[in-house]
Image (cartoon, helix red, strand yellow):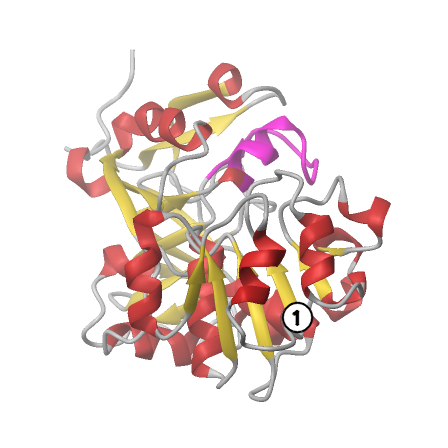
Amino acid sequence: MTEPASAPGIMRTVRFHENGEPVDVLRLETVPVPEPGPGRIRVAVHACGLAPADWALCRGLFPGSLPRGIGCDVSGTVEAVGAGVTDVAVGDRVFGTADFAGQPSAGAADRAVLDHWFAVPEGLDLTRAAALPMALSTASWHLARLGLAADRTILVNGAGTTIGYAAVQIALVRGARVIATAGETYAEQLRDLGATVVGYGEGLAERVKALGIGQVDLVFDTAPPGGALPELVEIVGGDPKRVLTCSDVAAAPEIGVRDTFHEDPAKRTDDELFGVFPEFAQLAAEGRFTVPIAATFPLADWRKALEISLTGHARGKLLLLPAVDAD
C-alpha cells in the first residue's frame, strides 16, 4: 500500500528499476527523502519538466546505476544545502537540473537533489521557470557550437519544438537574422518575435530561396527525424558542416552533418551549458523570453503526461506539479 506523500521522511517519485519502454518500466513509488551531498541542494519541487530525453534514459541512454528517476528540469524552494554550497539558503526559490545520474530519483518527485541551480528572479513564477533548463541549455550550447554571431543568418528547423522555440529567441537576442520552420501552432508567435517563418516539409529549400533573403549561413535542426537533412544542407550551399542537428543523430553521419553526440565532449563545459541561465531567466521575468508550456499535471497523473509526450505532438513543455496532489 502506498504511504501518504505527507508522511515524515518519505516522498513520492517516478522512477525505473530496469531499462525498457517507459510505459513498462516506470512506476510511482514512495522512497526516503534524499539528503544533498557536497555541492548539491535539495528542493521541495514546485514543477518538473518532462522531455523525450527522459524516455531515452528509460531505454538505456547514458546507462548507470539503477533505480533512476526521470525529470531533469526542476523549480522549487530550497530545503537543504550540502557541504560547500554558499550561494543559496533554505527558503530561496531556484530552478535548475536534477542530479539524475547521482541519485536514485530525479525531478519527478516531491523532493529533488539538484546539481545545477539558479535564482528565480522576481516576476518569474516557478511554473514557467521549470520549463527553461533543458530547452535553454540545449539551444544555447548548439548555437555556440555553430558559431552564431550577429552578422549571421540562421535557419532553425523545428522552431515549434521547445528547443527550437528557445533557439529562435536566443538567436534574435544575439542579433542574428532568423528563419524558422514551423506549423501553424506557433507560426504567428514566431513572426511576432521577429523571425521569418516558412512551412516545414518537402520543398523547404525552394521555399527558403523564394524568400529572397540571400545566403543562409547556418542551420540548427531540432525537428523530429523526417528526412530533412539533405535539404538543410542544400539551404546552406551544400556544406554539411554548417548544419547541426540535435534530433536526427542517426542520419547525420551518413551525409556529413554535425550532430550532438559527435561534437567535442571536452567543450561541453558548465559555462557553455548553463552560463546563459541568469540572463535568460531575467528576460523571462520581463516577458522577453519563454518556453511554451503545453499542459501541467499533478504528479499522480504522470502517465497522462507520458502518453501525450510519446505521441510526439505535445506542442510545448509538459510539466508535473507535485504540490498539487501532495496531501
Q: Residue at x 33, y 29 (%)?
A: 302
Q: What residue type is labelled 1?
A: Leu
Q: Name the foreground residue: 27 vs 158.
A: 158
Q: Give the range drawn in magenta.
A: 53-70
- Describe residue 279's horizontal placement relative to residue 249 as left or right: left
Q: Residue at x 22, y 25 (%)?
A: 4
Image coordinates of residue 137 in percent, x first then y, are 53, 64
Q: In which quarter of the image is the N terminus?
A: top left
- Vertical comparison of 193 with 42: above or below: below
Image coordinates of residue 312 in percent, x first then y, are 46, 33
- Vertical comparison of 244 with 70: above or below: below
Q: Does the magenta stretch include residue 46?
A: no
- Asked whether the viewer can see residue 1, the reply is yes
| Count of all numbered marks drawn on residues in the image | 1
Q: Name the foreground residue: 26 vs 286.
A: 286
Residue denoted by label 1: 218
Q: Name the foreground residue: 62 vs 56.
A: 56
Query: Few, some or many C-alpha atoms within 10 Å of disc 1 (few <14, some 14-19, many ≥20)?
Result: many
- Describe residue 46's horizontal placement relative to residue 265 as left or right: left
Q: Name the foreground residue: 99 vs 166.
A: 166
What is the secondary structure assignment of the residue under circle 1? strand
- Describe residue 191's horizontal placement relative to residue 25 as left or right: left
- Describe residue 180's horizontal placement relative to residue 258 as left or right: left
Q: Residue at x 47, y 62 (%)?
A: 180
Q: Is residue 58 magenta?
A: yes
- Asked whether the viewer can see residue 89, the reply is no
- Vertical comparison of 303 with 207: above or below: above
Which residue is at the far top? 1
Image coordinates of residue 46 in percent, x first then y, are 26, 50
